[in-house]
Amino acid sequence: MENKAENKMATMSVQKLMLSMGIPMILSMMLQAVYNIVDSAFVSNIPGVGEAALNALTLAFPVQMLMVAISIGTGVGANALLSKSLGQGDTKKASMTAGNAVFLATVIYIVFLLFGFFGVKAYIHSQSQNEIIIDMATEYLKICCILSFGIVYFSIFEKVLQATGRSLYSTIAQVAGAVVNIVLDPILIYGWLGLPEMGVKGAALATVIGQCVSFLCALIFHIRFNKEIKNKPEYFRPSMRIIGGIYTIGLPAIIAQALMSFMTYFLNIIFVRIGENVVTAYGLYYKIQQFILFAAFGLRDAITPIISFNYGMRSKERVRDGIKYGMIDTLVIMLAGFLLLEIFAVPLSSMFGLAGETESLCISAIRMISISYIFAGANVAFQGIFQALDSGLESLIISVCRQFLFVLPVAWVLTNIVIHGFPYKGIIWITFPVAELLSVVVALLFMRRVNKRKIAIL
């Protein structure tokens, strides 16, 4: 058994620990961003129905995002509670946390399994009247829901591996699944290697097979390397105390993930009042910026268990080091991302074959919204810090501020300014720097209070 004194979470230099855990997570998240773009590219090139197929995946996207939000949010809560328990030397509670997280994953899967059988068609019908798109979207989403156990269980075991400081293995598992997915996409979609051409059904099967590969890898790594976590049957028995602890931390993470979908949906409604090309430009920018923000999300997933473990160990110095180095590393990443996008805004936009005003709007979006990255990085880091310090409500409020409260009203006002004659449509992109700046002010006020109430008394 690996005791607390031997655990690298307790002994390794925090600066070195942040890099050793953070770099694999960052690379993993950036690979996920690449996969999202490649997957859409394959689907959009299905002969004859590429555009309809892409629309079908768009209709399915909110449910997939909700599935991921609930699964990852549950994993985040288990991650922080498990890390804290190990920091306190309470291996029994840590094992119960892991076991209850698996139980919750089973419940989540059953819910989406039932939705896959009974709810998908009605859900798709609520968004479209095009029978071709409805049929493809229903077929795609049914497969993703009925076989969703891969992504649901992987989300749990990924966070358990991260909580014990073994983020390299969670990254290997995610990379393995992503590679399988990318390789299978053209084979199953287009019917290569003698297989039948399956279109969007092939895309769905490639997705769930990749997710199952990731889950199986993560499960094997958990059983083999997480020796401090015991997998006795009694630890899988649901405990309301443990489940409550998981969701006290995890619920804000679930809401934060779900808010991304709602924000994009409402911004599309607001921006389309100016023109379809504004929505197109924002959608393409959103794919490009994933490379930068996903890197910050990856580092946040390292910040949370490091601080949580040492908070449980009641090490004030290491908690403060975790906050300091987590924030510094995040800001370095975001500064590099800002410079990268400012320099390569034009060639990045040209990759999507844009022209005229749409291309101009995309370039202006890249250059203006990237100004917000420093503030956005700080907000993402603060969310991880608050989750680690049992301050889930503060983390939730920051999510609501930066993805809803400060975004939509500003976007609405700036859109109305353009509609009433302002000559430069790109002014709407100021929405994002304003929202992130206001949110970071709120985060700093919360950090001052959390420091006084939780860190200073350690």
Image: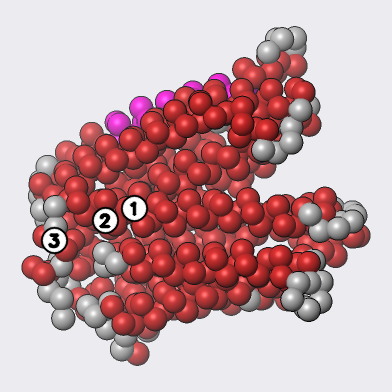
Query: Residue 254, position in %: x, y?
Result: 48, 55
| Residue 98 found in image quarter | bottom left
Identity, as a three-letter code, of the amino acid under mark 2: Ser
Q: Residues within 10 Å of mark 1 (few under 14, many from 20)?
A: some
How would you classify the magenta stretch by its main secondary structure? helix
Element type at mark 2: helix
Residue 430 is one of the magenta-drawn residues: yes
Element type at mark 1: helix
Measure the alpha-carbon separation of dots 1 and 3. Answer: 19 Å
Q: Is residue 348 visible?
A: yes
Relative height, residue 323 to residue 387 (above, below): above
Tell me which label, 3 or 2, sits earlier in the chain.
3
For residue 10, the mark is 3
Q: Residues within 10 Å of mark 3 (few under 14, many from 20)?
A: many
Give the residue at mark 2: 20
Measure the alpha-carbon separation of dots 3 and 2. Answer: 14 Å
Q: Identify which residue is drawn at 15% across, 67% down.
A: 7
Front label number (3 vs 2): 2
Give the residue at mark 1: 23
Residue 279 is one of the magenta-drawn residues: no
Q: Is residue 235 visible?
A: no
Q: Identify which residue is drawn at 75% across, 16% down.
A: 419
- Residue range in magenta is 428-446
Q: Identify which residue is drawn at 24% across, 80% down.
A: 227
| Residue 217 found in image quarter | bottom left
